[in-house]
Amino acid sequence: MYQQNARAIRAAAQANISKEAQPTGWRGKLANIDWTPDLGQNIGSGDWFRGLATMVSLAAVSLFFWPGFEPIRAEPATRMSAAQLDEFRALAIAPLAYGGDTGRKMRATDAVIALKESPERPSIDLAATFGRGDSFARVLQRAGVGGDEASNIENMLAGVMSLSDLKPGTQLDITLGRRTSRDEPRPVENIAFRAKFDLNVEIARQGEGLALKQKPIIVDETPLRIRGKVGSSLYRSARAAGAPAKAIQAYLRALGTKMSVSRDVRSTDEFDIVLGYKRAETGEIEVGDLMYAGLDRGGKSKAQLLRWKSGGKTQWFEASGVGESRGELARPVRGRVSSRYGMRRHPILKYRRMHSGLDFKARHGEPIYAATDGVVQYAGRKGGFGKYVKIRHGGGLASGYAHMSRIAVSSGRRVRRGQIIGYVGSTGLSTGPHLHYELYRGGRTINPQSVRFTTRAQLSGSDLRNFKAKLARLKRVEPGAALRSITKAEEVKEPVREIERIEASSS
Ligand SMILES: [Zn+2]
């Protein structure tokens, strides 16, 4: 239906064309030919074949313009002659960097006269390093000093300082002088190095021999004291105040011998750290070990710990001269054991019965310490025990302290090892001031001596006096005093130029 309509319209259009403009001759014929008939109709007819030919030729034309895929050439490659290439290589830098042999070289002409021998420098400046396990003479010999002279210098030095004190890595500035013949080593003109933190040494030629000169360096040994508020983190606050990380770790360890750092330190507390500190006038700094660890709360000292060597052992001592306690149980009182655990004849009851604890002979009023951390289970009078304290520790262990003159804790309170819980007395069934000390495991008494006591070092006599003097000295150090500039002795400068020398003498 639709196709029929289309044909009718086309026929009408052709009829119109033929009516209005009728081209004449071959042009008229050409114009009337339908070059693009519908290839779906009249298949095999002349019109159809003509349409096919039109389509094939159009396709052939478009295929003819199909582009190729060869690479696009932008610029022709440079071609160089052999001579140009040589010139190019001579000016290249990259091959030189790789150790190439490119570059222009002048050929010696007849005007060049070869030297018989090259001239020698009058002196050579060298830097040598003293290694680990090195010997001074070996360092010098490595630098080119003759064997005799090297051992000579080593002997000279040994008279002034201990050569084993020389630190590995020490730099030696060596100047070697002119020699008379090429066959022999150069003589030493000058050697300068830092022998110690506070000493420079210079060995210089004077006439025939060498002279050794010692130049002391001013060293300030004011300890470095750092104080500050604990804040949210003791470590971070101390770091911010300028304490080295290693010193803070040592501080925390020291404080840990006295209290629990995580539980007992408050953010409002003030830490007080004193470090060994040495400063040379030349600017070098040596930070030493932690000397003092303190913690203040509200202007009062909570902990004062000083490193002190006593009896060949270095440990932390409290301001009172009491050392660290080690091990499980501390000794409850200072005094000797006067009666052991076991069967014995009771001094008052006058018959044999079990002595269920240890008796310590001690003076009236001597402090009694908790054997280890725990909670006070009982504090008060208890029959023949008189004034008595029982402390419950972990692990089914408990300890009891009897015959006290005064009790210093109340029931339910937490106590720490070494804390004073009362004082020696003679209350209850007792013949004289002593401490009756019991240890319980699972509610039954056990021999306290089967459990090892710890001993706490206690300084006394001149040791204690020296200790207290040092503590006072350290506590007098002003925070930051070690950072002030070193007061240098006035130096008289030697005039360098002749004109200055004249001016100085005339004025
Ligand atoms: Zn007893």
Image: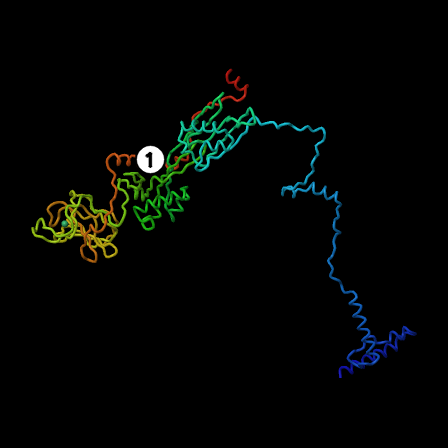
Describe the element under mark 1 as helix, strand or loop: helix
Residue 196 screen position, x and y as percent: 42, 32
Residue nearer the viewer, 411 or 50: 50
Image-based side of 54 in relation to 419, left or right: right
Image-based side of 475 in relation to 30, left or right: left
Residue 167 screen position, x and y as percent: 43, 35
Residue 331 screen position, x and y as percent: 22, 47
Above or below, comparing residue 17 to residue 270 in the picture: below
Image-based side of 294 in relation to 53, left or right: left
Q: Residue at x 43, y 31 (%)?
A: 195
Residue most extreme to the left:
350
Residue most extreme to the right:
25
Q: Amino acid at mark 1?
A: Arg
Q: Residues within 10 Å of mark 1 (few under 14, many from 20)?
A: few
The verdict on label 1 being within 8 Å of ligand 1 is: no
Residue 202 screen position, x and y as percent: 46, 27
Residue nearer the viewer, 314 or 232: 314
Above or below, comparing residue 194 to residue 254 in the picture: above
| Number of numbered labels in the structure image | 1
Q: Residue at x 62, y 28 (%)?
A: 117
What colour scheme was applied to this rendering of the protein? rainbow
Residue most extreme to the bottom:
1
- On-image quarter of the N terminus: bottom right
Residue assigned mark 1: 476
Residue most extreme to the front:
183
Q: Residue at x 9, y 50 (%)?
A: 346
Above or below, comparing residue 463 to residue 327 in the picture: above
Residue nearer the viewer, 451 or 362: 451
Residue nearer the viewer, 169 or 466: 169
